Image (spheres, helix red, strand yellow):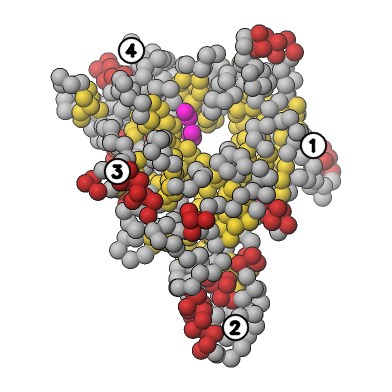
């Protein structure tokens, strides 16, 4: 199950491109923070100078609001303009609680405050919110409705004055099992039918990690305590409900996390996907009040190398689940970084639910033999198959996991891991970055309809406070071509992008970090140039030449003068009749010969020349922040 670490030969191959000849490219356009501000396509929000750790936790597109948790504050922002009259709730801890936290020695970096870690929709008018509570987690309810009597009397009033945004008095309750004591330990959560599922650290010292179910009518549940086979010092990344079939009892909640290898003496990090059944009630005699359907598998994101050796990007950083027309089969985008000291790099891998389910339906991992090595379990698998949900497609007569035989429960406790690993689509990363001075930290994806098809546009946040807009186009022989359409500095100073949310409806991207939140428009078509050829060569699916300028492409537009070619970027075919200034002209062979030459050979701001085996991004270094 473990794999060899990369060698210097593989590092060299990654420097020049991966096994597909996939080369790292420079961005078509690079905008500094100052230039981005001057473009009038971005807004920056920060609450107070001493308030940090902005985490975008919930976007409510139905009410045009975004809810942000930070240190001692809950913020409600307008999705159209995050600077338009933000609504604030100051939710701090008492002085007594702060003093107790300080006396415990936990305030070295200002942790003795209330860091908001969870914001979930409770109903149409209320949110459920939890905070670290100065190492004493607490939860409460927030009324986020509207002043009904005012709105009914004056329906034309749709501004911020109509909104109610306050804590419900007397509703504070324990946040144990919902929010970590230590604000530095990330937690993930999902509120489903009044029941809260959370991946969290439950103790003061931050040693007991678990996947919990609290609230609601079902039994409170957790993973087996202090069992390294189940969870071994995990870092939780994401939680997502994904239905398995048309039968509701088959529904499973998937948790994405990274953890230490459970093999003794190993320092390896493994990226994982785990899952549980929503209707899991635990065992009758064994695993009482503990998950009896918990399984996990390893996520692999690697570059194939010579002699079958793979270069691994081990540490899962972020997940984006792209919904499709089939709710059972979304596309999973994942960002990974390299954990070794040999080289610095990151990658994006894409997974299909078909491959994920195949691994969970495959052999279980088992340790046996004189060397106590991992092997596929070859013994008899008890019925019902471990990990199967009660009352579902395959167990209609069993209404609860408490009805499962003891041998099923005992097998689950000792075999929570699948033997086979989950590999990405085409067995290789979609995007690779090595030997650059940044790493990817977050991802979000937008589906864009262009003149020549639908494209997935990736927005990738970095640890240097920039966001790259990337598309990957298919080529011949299973190869792909990656284009960095744009890279923008979204914060004034270098800082890690913590989280991103995208609104395709509003064509906006919301980026959070310790410095604040930046709202960025998804496209800036005018920066590509003033000529038709410039717009065509940019190959941005958001943009097209409209006869006068490079502007937003809309699939519903019927204007005959619109020119766009994302797949090939061929100005000869698209821009006949327009000169270098964007004006219509008679056909000129000299113009189109020059355009063809610039699209394939000569370096330009839109198509930088490659220098040797790596792009000029690696050669010249990155433009530093101003």
Q: Position of residue 92 (x, y in %)?
A: 72, 21
The residue depicted at 28 percent of the width and 48 percent of the height is 305
Q: Earlier in the sequence, mark 4 or mark 3?
A: 4
Dot 4 crowding, Cα within 10 Å, few <14, some 14–19, many 20+ = some
**Alpha-carbon distance for marks 1 and 4?**
51 Å
Q: Earlier in the sequence, mark 3 or mark 1?
A: 1
Q: Earlier in the sequence, mark 3 or mark 2?
A: 3
Pick whichever, 127 or 138, lies toward us.
138
Q: Position of residue 603 (x, y in %)?
A: 51, 69
Q: Position of residue 95 (x, y in %)?
A: 75, 13
Q: Nearer the viewer, mark 1 or mark 4?
A: 4
Dot 2 crowding, Cα within 10 Å, few <14, some 14–19, many 20+ = many
Residue 54 location, quadrant: top right
Residue assigned mark 3: 310
Q: What range is drawn magenta here?
A: 235-239
Residue assigned mark 1: 147
């Amino acid at each position: 199950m473990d794999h060899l670490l990369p060698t210097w030969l593989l590092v060299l191959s990654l420097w020049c491109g991966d096994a597909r000849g996939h080369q790292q490219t420079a961005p078509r356009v690079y905008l500094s923070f100052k230039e981005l501000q001057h473009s009038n396509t971005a807004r920056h929000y920060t609450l107070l100078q001493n308030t940090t750790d902005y985490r975008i936790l919930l976007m409510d597109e139905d009410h045009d609001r975004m809810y942000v948790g930070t240190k001692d504050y809950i913020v409600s922002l307008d999705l159209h303009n995050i600077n338009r009259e933000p609504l604030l709730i100051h939710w701090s801890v008492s002085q007594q609680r702060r003093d107790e936290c300080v006396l415990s020695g936990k305030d070295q970096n200002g942790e003795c405050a209330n860091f908001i870690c969870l914001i979930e929709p409770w109903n149409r008018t209320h949110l459920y919110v939890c905070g670290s509570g100065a190492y004493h987690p607490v939860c409460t309810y927030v009324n986020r409705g509207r002043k009904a009597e005012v709105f009914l009397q004056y329906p034309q009033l749709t501004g911020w004055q109509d909104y109610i945004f306050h804590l419900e008095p007397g509703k504070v309750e324990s946040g144990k099992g919902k929010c970590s004591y230590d604000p530095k330990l990330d937690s993930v959560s999902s509120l489903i039918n009044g029941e809260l599922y959370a991946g969290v650290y439950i103790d003061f010292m931050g040693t007991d990690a678990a996947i919990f179910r609290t609230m609601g009518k079902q039994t409170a549940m957790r993973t087996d305590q202090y069992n390294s086979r189940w969870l071994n010092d995990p870092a939780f990344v994401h939680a997502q409900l994904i239905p398995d079939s048309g039968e509701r009892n088959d529904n499973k909640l998937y948790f994405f996390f990274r953890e230490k290898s459970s093999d003794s003496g190993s320092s390896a990090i493994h990226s994982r996907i785990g899952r549980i059944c929503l209707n899991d009630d635990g065992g009758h005699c064994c695993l009482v009040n503990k998950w009896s359907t918990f399984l996990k598998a390893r996520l692999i994101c690697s570059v194939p190398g010579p002699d079958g050796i793979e270069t691994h990007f081990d540490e899962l950083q972020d997940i984006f689940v792209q919904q499709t027309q089939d709710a059972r089969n979304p596309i999973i985008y994942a960002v990974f970084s390299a954990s070794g000291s040999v080289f610095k790099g990151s990658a994006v891998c894409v997974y299909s639910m078909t491959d994920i389910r195949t691994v969970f339906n495959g052999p279980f991992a088992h340790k046996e033999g004189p060397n106590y090595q991992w092997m596929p379990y070859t013994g008899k698998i008890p019925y019902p198959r471990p990990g199967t949900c009660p009352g579902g497609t395959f167990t209609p007569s069993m209404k609860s996991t408490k009805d499962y035989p003891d041998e099923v429960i005992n097998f689950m406790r000792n075999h929570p891991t699948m033997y086979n690993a989950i590999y990405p689509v085409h067995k290789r990363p979609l995007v690779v970055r090595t030997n650059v001075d940044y790493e990817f930290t977050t991802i979000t994806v937008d589906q864009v309809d262009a003149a020549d098809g639908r494209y997935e546009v990736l927005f990738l946040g970095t640890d240097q406070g920039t966001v790259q807009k990337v598309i990957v186009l298919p080529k011949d022989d299973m190869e792909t071509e990656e284009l960095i359409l744009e890279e923008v500095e979204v914060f004034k100073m270098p800082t890690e992008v913590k989280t991103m949310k995208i609104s395709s409806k509003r064509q906006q991207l919301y980026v959070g970090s310790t410095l604040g939140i930046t709202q960025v428009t998804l496209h800036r078509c005018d920066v590509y140039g003033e000529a038709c050829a410039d717009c065509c060569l940019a190959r941005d699916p958001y943009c097209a030449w409209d006869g006068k300028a490079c502007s937003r492409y809309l699939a519903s537009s019927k204007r005959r003068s619109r020119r766009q070619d994302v797949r090939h970027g061929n100005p000869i075919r698209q821009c006949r009749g327009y000169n270098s200034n964007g004006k219509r002209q008679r056909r000129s062979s000299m113009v189109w010969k020059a355009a063809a030459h610039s699209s394939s050979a000569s370096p330009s701001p839109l198509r930088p020349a490659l220098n040797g085996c790596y792009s000029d991004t690696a050669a010249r270094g990155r433009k530093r922040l101003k």
